[in-house]
């Protein structure tokens, strides 16, 4: 893949589907958010590898991030 990836946002905060300042109480801040597909990527640095994000985090993301699609945890090899 080459070129600019302007549709990827890194560590932006959202509350009620609106971009807000970092640290806004109750906001969600995905590690990477693909604004074209709505996919959220959450980098995990742990040996425990569940197949999905925890229910509370998935619900919070769905409430706050606009047009959310898949929510995927990413683990190091």
Image (cartoon, helix red, strand yellow):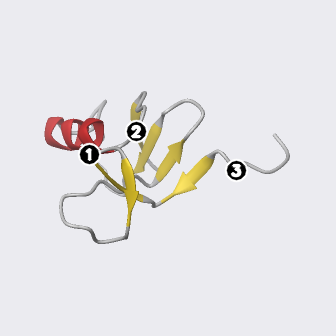
Q: What residue is at 72 percent from the left and 48 percent from the top? A: 5
Residue 32 in the image: above or below residue 51: below
Dot 1 lies on which element?
Answer: loop
Q: Separation of disc 2 and disc 1 at Cα?
A: 29 Å
Residue of label 1:
48
| Numbered badge on residue 6 | 3
On the image, the x and y values in percent for residue 21 come to: 37, 69
Q: Between tags 3 and 1, which lies in front? A: 3
Which secondary structure lies at badge 2?
loop
Foreground: disc 2 or disc 1: 2
Residue 66, numbered label: 2
Neighbours of disc 1 within 10 Å: few (<14), some (14-19), many (20+): few
Outermost residue, left side: 56
Task: Work out whether 65 lies above or below 19.
Answer: above
Dot in front, 3 or 2: 2
Residue under the point 50% across and 50% down: 32
User: In terms of depth relative to the viewer, which is nearer, 58 or 64?
Assistant: 64
């Amino acid at each position: 893949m080459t070129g600019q990836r302007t549709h990827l946002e890194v560590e932006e905060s959202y509350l009620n589907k609106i971009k807000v300042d970092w640290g806004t109480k109750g906001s969600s801040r995905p590690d990477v958010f693909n604004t074209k597909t709505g996919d959220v990527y959450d980098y995990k640095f742990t040996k425990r590898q569940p197949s999905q994000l925890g229910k509370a985090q998935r619900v919070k993301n769905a409430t706050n991030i606009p047009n959310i699609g898949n929510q995927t945890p990413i683990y190091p090899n």
